[in-house]
Image: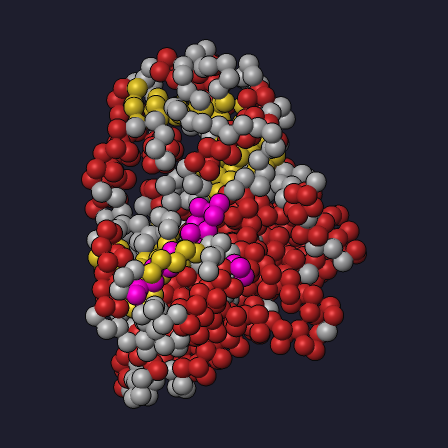
Amino acid sequence: MSYKNFTIETDADGIALVTWDMPEKSMNVFTIEVMDELDKIIDQVVADSAIKGVVITSGKSSFSGGADLSMIQASFDLLKDAQAKDPATAVEKLFEATGRMTWLYRKLETCGKPWVAAINGTCMGGAFEMSLACHGRVASNAKSVKIALPEVKVGIFPGAGGTQRVPRLANAQDALQMMTTGSSLTAARAKAMNLVHQVVEPDQLIPAAKQMIKDGLKPVQPWDEKGFKAPGGGIWTPAAAQLWPAAPAILRRETSGNYPGALAILKCVYEGLQVPFETGLKIEQRYFTHVLQTTEAFSMIRSLFISMQELGKGARRPAGQPKAEFKKIAVVGAGFMGASIAYVTAAAGIPVVLIDRDQEAADKGKGVSQGLVTGAVGKGRMTKEEGEKLLSLITPTPDYASLADADLVIEAVFEDRNVKKEVTEKIEAVLREDAIFASNTSTLPISGLAKNSKRPEQFIGIHFFSPVDKMMLVEVILGKETGDRALATALDYVAAIKKTPIVVNDTRGFYVNRCVFRYMAEAYDMLIEGVPAAMIENAAKMAGMPVGPLSLNDEVAVDLSYKIFKASIADLGAESVDPRHMELVTKLVEGEGRLGRKAGKGFYDYPPKPAKKKLWPGLKDLYPQQKPENVDIQVIKERLLGTIALEAARTMEEGIVTDPREADVGSILGFGFAPYTGGTLSYIDGMGVKTFVELCEKLAAKYGSHFQPTPLLKDMAAKGETFYSRFAPEAKKAA
């Protein structure tokens, strides 16, 4: 028999090598078609008496990334259709659909012939669950091997037997840790946890897997043997008595109960370990069906899986533009930002020239890359040779003539119009006619900066976030005259450095910073009202934010807020800044010299390590304090998330952001907006626009007019619309 996605070769020893190699895809993923073929392969193996066992491996550089997004999307579509046709049986149909993979893997492990998974490269999610259903697992020791069950990161959990097999192989604590964090394991760590049997050199992968079968691998899983006990003895042991009462509390501390998928993992493991294996699989299937129906799962999958992939693949790239090839990129300004941009460019294998006013400053910039390389080599993320190759691609120089043959120039000098004007003119004096000019600015409008350019159609904003090597988001900003070729080039560059772009139109602060400023401004309001600072910070984390607004302000620098306020007053007049906010940051910066983390003191004090940062006690003395018992935590959470979401809605109304996918993905990747909501606009859509408008009106009545819902929101509430229906990205794609 022949298959589209698999090939089968049986050797003289009767071992079938099943190679998974999907045509026209860079990575193997599970689709309905792949599962149908795997089902037939199991039948073929069972029927063919010449086949003694099976080794399954990948024909690509990675094993598999897990389930295809179309499969997950199909589950939501199935539920929607079933609810419309026959609500009574809708959940039943979803239950059946979600169990397809589970029972296919069960069929594999009980087929009576031994299967061995030979794992190379990435092996994630449903692909690793299939490997766990195999009787043997061999992994390559290459650095590229990453084994994980990351489903919790997109709102669901390992629902194809993962919650049942992992805790029957590894101890419960390690199993919970792996699944509730979604963290990646190296091959060595997976072996230490008993999740793989052998780790071998890459060229020994298939021979070692075949040898397992030749050595008499039993086609029976440990949990199907009589008298099986889970590692550590299962649930009713002294060790378990220490783990299980604490586990929900630890999870609540880490997630504040915002992630139904994470809690379901605990329930699946706890309940599953007390019953026979197949009953455990049914328990898992039941919880998976439940979690799939939650708003959190729908929103997270849409934003963090589907939309992120679509944006990464160039959903906003203008049609008809040839793909940009980068032979050389120049970065002008070798400060921390520019130096970090040079690093990520070189890490993508692109030669980069790093320019500053003199050789010393340029060399200092390259030193940032050297520091990052040393750190990566020390942590084993990069070999010494790879580090040397990366550094060889960065040429520090003060000579502007060296950018004459650059395909793209990124200006990353000080955030000052005059400085940027001077540098733009110097660059354009030598720049190739067809090269693209990008400015890395965080607040200055691009159209204004483009006035310094002789070719505004080739001028674009590319806004990176700090630290550049870690932050996945890049804002691509269109000036009024930016042309399609500049946009296509910018998006091709962001794709080359493996980051996720969002395209925004021009305005002060663009999209992300506008939302971030609202978050910090709301915290200023609360401080002024006398809300204890610790309650503000803790409520923010309970709402799902990664850091509190005061902590974030320290990170970006309090004196930067002070400078932005001053610039805003100079450009837009005194009424553009709340005088109370100006007074607060002036007190901190000028009165107390508290400039933020960089100065060792801001809203927090930063004592020498290992001591931890703590809130500055003097904050209590700035304003009369409310009693903690009089402060409603729920209201603080609503205010912090609501003010950000409202600002995101304003950017849609003003046409700054035009695609809800970008607003959502940008808010999560840019500043960690409560990921369980799916992002700022999904937060509004998830509770319903009408409910959100009512919440805003309630908050506006008590806390100020900045909470007043906008005309767009009121119109959408009246019409029963959502952001994803009114600004449907699918409709745009089809057009």
Name the spot of residue 77 as percent of width and height, x first.
64, 62
Residue depicted at x 59% and y 64% = 75
The colour mode here is: secondary structure
Compared across the picture, whether 90 is left or right of 383 comes to: right
Name the outermost residue toward the top: 429
Q: Main secondary structure of the magenta part?
A: loop
Is residue 29 part of the magenta span, yes or no? yes
Measured as percent of width and height from the top left, residue 730 is found at 66, 47
> Relative to 194, does residue 669 appear above or below in the rendering?
above
Residue toward you, 298 or 228? 228
Residue 218 rendering spot, x and y as whole percentages: 28, 76
Residue 250 in view here:
no
Q: Which residues are magenta?
A: 14-33
For the residue pair 596 and 22, the one nearer the viewer reads as: 22
**Residue drawn at the location 74% of the way across and 70% of the way down:** 85
**Position of 483 relative to 253 (above/below):** above
Q: Is residue 675 above or below residue 285?
A: above
Q: Is residue 406 visible?
A: yes
Q: Nearer the viewer, residue 297 or 320?
A: 320
Q: Residue at x 75, y 53 (%)?
A: 716
Work out whether residue 289 or residue 727 is closer to the camera in this orientation and state it: 289
The picture places residue 455, in percent across and down from the top left corner, at 56, 16
Residue placed at 58% from the left, 74% from the top?
95
Does the magenta-highlighted stretch encompass residue 343?
no
Q: Quadrant of the C terminus?
A: top right
Q: Is residue 99 left or right of residue 341?
A: right
Report which quarter residue 619 is drawn in: bottom left
